[in-house]
């Protein structure tokens, strides 16, 4: 057996802990399932449509849907060379055994027929994720559905960090009642109650998505400033950026303390967020430097490799012991390999993780297969160049695919029902 074959067999047989997903409840997917419905439902494809200008809304979550093949194919022409589309298409071809390497009208109809038949099986969704992709545990954004047979919830408390925004304040008021939210202490009491409930319900981590609303620089707000900011926020129906940031900073520091107390990691979106009203610089992970140093007992996990700030993520992880890195949502081939190659050289591999950031089973399968293939290519090169041994290569792959997440997130692996995980095994 060649070095590549040995690495390939090991990597493709390893179970994966998916550190980050937004999987849709399969019960909410259109029936009968079709190729058009699949592409309309894919959040990652919708971001591509938005960036290409193929659909008109600036927020990809509110884009209109394609109604037929002609509309779809016209939009496809501008994104068909992008990495995510190629990765997604390769996954679909493998799952549904399509007869062509590209989508045309005939293949589109073939895919629709096969999707319709497959989704008649009640457990098809789970089968694709667990048995075909080999994903044994998935950390699921708890705003989505959580099937505890294969999903582990991740808690979100963004509504507290963004309490100064009326639309987010309303969410807290709706749950706890206005009478409990007349003071900063009342707000923190509600936060602590929700936090404790989430941990008791099995949350493996806390996710924060502040990049979608603001720059992720969280100062050490004083209590007196936070009290004033709370009073300004609660007394006004308008959004006050200054008060919102001050209060949000104070709450975020409290969330960090709670994560340390309960020993759960804090996962942070870094890099760009969707929509035209989000600034790329908001997600620069360097903004988190002081926060991570301020809370040395909190495990910080920087998501998405920082987008265009991968080097900054790397340097933070090298400098700060409680900073970990996650490649979730890096939908590339060469770019993913370049980042991972650099990180393995510079960052202890025990601090690196990976997740799909998928919202569909087909997404999860495609992205898992792509990551395994990229990992095989990289490790083969490193072994052949004698940078490290085959034994070290296998150790690194096990850590990246499941070992680190299992340790940091305290995830118990659930072995898939079969080992029918396909991909680059014969390469």
Image (tube, grey):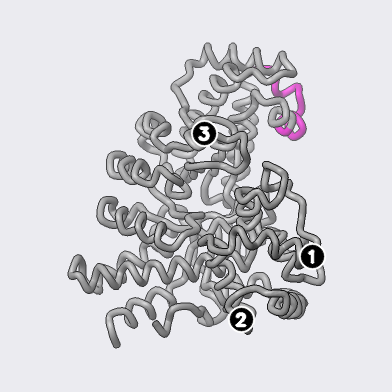
Callout 3: SS:
helix
Residue 100, disc:
2
**Is 45 situated above or below 392?**
above
- SS for tag 2? loop
In depth, the one of 348 and 80 nearer the eye is 80
Q: Name the residue rendered at 61%, 56% in the picture.
A: 44
Residue 398, compared with residue 157, is above or below; it is below
Q: Circles 3 and 2: CB distance less than 8 Å?
A: no
| Mark 1 → mark 2, Cα distance in angstroms | 20 Å
Magenta residues?
A: 171-184
Q: Residue 232 location in percent, x, y? A: 65, 13
In terms of depth relative to the viewer, which is nearer, 402 or 110? 110
Residue depicted at x 43% and y 52%: 326
Whether residue 277 is visible, yes or no, is: yes
In the image, residue 173 lies in the stretch drawn in magenta: yes
Residue hosting label 3: 255
Q: Residue drawn 42% across and 31% down? A: 287
Q: Earlier in the sequence, mark 3 or mark 2?
A: 2
Mark number for residue 68? 1
Q: Can residue 302 be spotted in the picture?
A: no
Residue 37 higher or lower than 248, as above or below: below
350 to the left or right of 368 = left
């Amino acid at each position: 057996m060649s070095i590549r074959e040995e690495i390939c067999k090991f990597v493709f047989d390893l179970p994966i802990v998916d550190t980050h997903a937004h999987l849709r409840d399969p019960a909410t997917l259109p029936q009968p399932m079709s190729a058009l419905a699949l592409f309309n439902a894919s959040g990652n494809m919708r971001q591509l449509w938005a960036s290409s200008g193929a659909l008109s809304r600036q927020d990809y979550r509110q884009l209109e849907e394609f109604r037929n093949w002609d509309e779809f194919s016209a939009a496809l022409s501008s994104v068909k060379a992008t990495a995510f589309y190629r990765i997604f298409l390769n996954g679909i071809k493998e799952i549904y055994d399509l007869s062509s390497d590209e989508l045309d009208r005939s293949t589109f109809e073939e895919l629709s027929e096969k999707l319709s038949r497959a989704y008649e099986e009640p457990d098809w969704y789970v089968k694709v994720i667990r048995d075909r992709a080999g994903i044994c545990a998935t950390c699921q954004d708890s705003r989505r559905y959580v099937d505890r047979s294969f999903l582990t919830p991740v808690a979100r408390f963004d509504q507290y960090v963004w309490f100064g925004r009326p639309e987010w304040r309303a969410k807290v008021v709706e749950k706890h009642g206005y009478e409990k939210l007349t003071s900063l202490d009342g707000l923190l009491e509600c936060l602590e109650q929700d936090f404790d409930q989430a941990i008791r319900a099995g949350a493996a981590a806390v996710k924060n998505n502040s990049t979608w609303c603001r720059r992720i620089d969280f100062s050490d707000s004083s209590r007196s400033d936070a009290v004033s900011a709370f009073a300004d926020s609660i007394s006004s129906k308008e959004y006050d950026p200054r008060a919102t940031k001050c209060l949000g900073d104070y709450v975020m520091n409290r969330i960090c303390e709670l994560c340390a107390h309960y020993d759960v990691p804090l996962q942070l979106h870094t890099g760009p967020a969707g929509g035209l009203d989000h600034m790329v610089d908001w997600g620069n992970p360097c903004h988190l430097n002081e926060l991570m140093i301020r809370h040395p007992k909190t495990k910080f996990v920087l998501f998405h490799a920082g987008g265009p700030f991968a080097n900054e993520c790397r340097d933070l992880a090298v400098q700060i012991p409680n900073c970990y890195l996650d490649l979730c949502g890096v939908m590339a081939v060469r770019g993913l390999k370049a980042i991972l190659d650099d990180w393995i050289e510079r960052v202890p591999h025990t601090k690196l993780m990976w997740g799909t950031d998928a919202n569909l089973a087909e997404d999860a399968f495609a992205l898992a297969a792509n990551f395994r293939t990229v990992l095989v290519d990289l490790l083969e090169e490193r072994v052949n160049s004698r940078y490290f041994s085959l034994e070290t290569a296998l150790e690194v792959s096990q850590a990246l695919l499941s070992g680190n997440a299992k340790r940091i997130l305290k995830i118990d692996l659930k072995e898939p029902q079969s080992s029918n995980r396909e991909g680059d095994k014969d390469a």
